[in-house]
Image (spheres, rainbow, N blue to C red):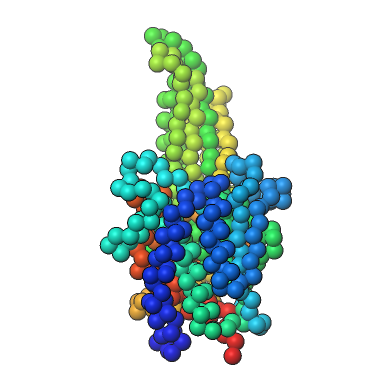
């Protein structure tokens, strides 16, 4: 470890208590959708202390609707500001976006939590609370990385653009608004909870709805009708077969440890109106994974074609075809060449800090990296502290040690990527 790397390591170790306090304050602000303002004010306060150029704005839906990638269930982003802080370099270096979402999913059933969902309680080296792992721990790691470099008077050639965005959990409107506002860079890192794995590629996803038709009749003479529930069971089996077909094509080694690289999840089934009636309609809703090598349009078309094959299984579907709809949220997939210079640099800094090689995988879920890569022309890596398995779960927590390790790795990566001014 060289002298500068040692100084960064020592600075982060010395300021661990400060980092824990910051993360605790962030988690204690319940920044669910529409409630991001207070925690963003804390972010602004910190960026001002660091001397960054700060940009604060509430995205306008009318400016984003023109993008095919835009999705939201909200009518306005009032009181839900984006925050960007820019650390200007001296020139001649590569720029880097550090992107993290500040919104969190709802806490769910409070009875399933051992403590208040927004307690920020610290116990046995872990900090508990909704959003701790997804992804306020990663946001704090980014801030600590920047603060370490600025405090040590390390000057950069390239710009660093820190983004604290809203709406990632609902499809990425916050990051799309950053792109629309002109924020682009030579590359980006998103410290989502990857278990400290490096994700150069990530899955996208879409929500779908399939309406299955039957024919109503009295339950006492059910043989005179056609049960939409029974037909829906065949549709589910058909979708399960579709999942097998799609995943049989995956040969990318980054997926070798993932049991189902591109899952099709059936999340909701509803139908029928009366126990003594044969149901004439059932609605199936789910999520389909989109591979890094695919587009949303390709997957929509392939899904429609596959459902048309139902008539080969059951002649009922010839005259009563299913209706396929795409609704709600979607996330774009993305991929970066594993030989990209940022992958090489991040891998080397990981090895230098932790003394071992990182695991490179393809992400099993989507992030705002799809928007940065495909819409913002900014190749993106996903890498950060936190356990993927704890995201959106009761008693969510993050291991504090990983936050500081990630901060150190990020700080070293920033210097190497952006270039150091002499």
Quadrant housing the C terminus? bottom right
The residue under the point 61% across, 64% down is 84
Residue 73, by quadrant, is: top right
Q: Picture coordinates of residue 45 (x, y %)?
A: 56, 65
The residue under the point 39% across, 81% down is 10
Compare residues 380 and 310 and report the one nearer the observer: 380
> What is the total number of numbered labels drawn onto the structure image?
0
Against 234, is 300 above or below?
A: below
The residue under the point 57% across, 41% down is 328
Q: Picture coordinates of residue 187 (x, y %)?
A: 58, 70
Residue 362 appearing in the image: no
Q: Picture coordinates of residue 319 (x, y %)?
A: 57, 24
The residue under the point 61% across, 57% down is 82
Against 16, is 65 above or below?
A: above
Q: Is residue 188 left or right of residue 358?
A: right
Q: Picture coordinates of residue 14 (x, y %)?
A: 39, 77
Compare residues 111 and 344 and report the one nearer the observer: 111
Residue 123 appearing in the image: yes
Compare residues 285 and 169 and report the one nearer the observer: 169
Residue 5, by quadrant, is: bottom left
Q: Is residue 166 left or right of residue 249?
A: right
Quadrant housing the N terminus? bottom left
Residue occupying the far left of the picture: 124
């Amino acid at each position: 470890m060289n002298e500068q790397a040692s100084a960064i390591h020592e600075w982060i170790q010395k300021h661990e208590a400060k980092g824990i306090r910051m993360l605790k304050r962030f988690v204690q602000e319940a920044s669910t959708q529409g409630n991001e303002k207070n925690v963003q004010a804390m972010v602004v306060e910190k960026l001002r202390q660091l001397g960054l150029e700060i940009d604060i704005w509430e995205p306008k839906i009318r400016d984003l609707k023109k993008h095919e990638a835009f999705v939201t269930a909200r009518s306005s982003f009032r009181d839900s500001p984006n925050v960007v802080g820019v650390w200007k370099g001296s020139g001649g270096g590569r720029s880097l976006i550090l992107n993290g979402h500040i919104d969190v999913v709802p806490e769910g059933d409070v009875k399933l939590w051992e403590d208040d969902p927004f307690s920020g309680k610290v116990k046995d080296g872990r900090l508990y609370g909704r959003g701790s792992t997804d992804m306020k721990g990663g946001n704090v790691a980014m801030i600590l990385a920047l603060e370490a470099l600025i405090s040590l008077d390390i000057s950069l050639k390239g710009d660093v653009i820190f983004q604290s965005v809203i709406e990632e959990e609902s499809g990425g409107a916050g990051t799309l608004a950053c792109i629309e506002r002109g924020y682009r860079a030579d590359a980006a890192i998103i410290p989502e909870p990857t278990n400290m794995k490096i994700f150069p590629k990530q899955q996208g996803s879409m929500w779908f709805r399939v309406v299955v038709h039957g024919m109503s009749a009295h339950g006492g003479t059910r043989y005179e009708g056609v049960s939409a529930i029974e037909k829906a069971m065949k549709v589910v089996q058909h979708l399960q077969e579709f999942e097998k077909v799609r995943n049989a094509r995956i040969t990318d080694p980054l997926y070798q440890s993932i049991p189902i690289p591109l899952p099709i999840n059936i999340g909701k089934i509803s139908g029928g109106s009366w126990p003594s009636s044969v149901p004439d309609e059932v609605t199936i809703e789910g999520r389909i994974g989109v591979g890094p090598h695919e587009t949303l349009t390709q997957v929509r078309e392939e899904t429609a074609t596959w459902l048309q094959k139902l008539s080969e299984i059951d002649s009922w579907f010839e005259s009563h075809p299913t209706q396929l709809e795409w609704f709600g949220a979607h996330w774009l997939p993305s991929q970066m060449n594993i030989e990209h210079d940022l992958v090489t640099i991040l891998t080397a800094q990981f090895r230098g800090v932790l003394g071992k090689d990182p695991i490179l995988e393809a992400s099993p879920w989507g992030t705002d990296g799809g928007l940065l890569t495909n819409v913002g022309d900014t190749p993106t890596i996903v890498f950060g502290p936190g356990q993927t398995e704890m995201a959106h779960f009761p008693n969510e927590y993050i291991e504090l040690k990983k936050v500081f390790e990630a901060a150190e790795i990020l700080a070293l990566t920033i210097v190497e990527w952006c270039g150091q001014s002499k």
